[in-house]
């Protein structure tokens, strides 16, 4: 799944960085994420429920945070 977009956030850069590295907040920020479990640092297993119109599905996914540049950016694989 490729999740993209821009959302203006009115907070200090360090606060946003800390939030995006918090599994509970990362779960809330991931569309359809029902659960998120850290299996090792920056590597998560997720249970995701997504659908388009009447076609819906439950998925198991792995998310890995990579390319961390404190506190400017991070990528995921």
Image (cartoon, rainbow, N blue to C red):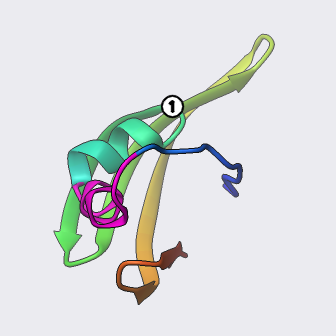
The spot of residue 3 in percent (x, y) is 66, 52
Residue 41 located within the stretch drawn in magenta: no
Q: Is residue 63 left or right of residue 8?
A: left
Q: Is residue 45 left or right of residue 29?
A: left
At mark 1, the secondary structure is loop
Looking at the image, which residue is at 36% across and 49% down? Answer: 11
Q: Position of residue 40 (x, y in %)?
A: 19, 77
Q: 62 and 31: which one is in front?
A: 31
Which quarter of the figure is the N terminus placed in? bottom right
Q: Quadrant of residue 42?
A: bottom left
Q: Which residues are magenta?
A: 11-22
- Which quadrant of the figure has residue 66? bottom left
The number of numbered badges drawn on the structure is: 1
Q: Which residue is mark 1?
A: 32
Camera-side residue: 59 or 37?
A: 37
Q: Residues within 10 Å of mark 1 (few under 14, many from 20)?
A: some
Whether 71 is drawn above or below 69: the answer is above
């Amino acid at each position: 799944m490729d999740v993209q977009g821009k959302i203006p956030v009115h907070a200090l850069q360090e606060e946003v960085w800390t939030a995006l590295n918090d599994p509970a907040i990362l779960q809330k920020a991931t569309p359809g994420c029902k659960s998120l479990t850290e299996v090792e640092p920056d590597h998560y297993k997720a249970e995701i429920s997504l659908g388009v119109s009447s076609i819906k599905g439950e998925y198991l996914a792995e998310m890995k945070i990579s390319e961390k540049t404190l506190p400017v950016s991070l990528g995921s694989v």
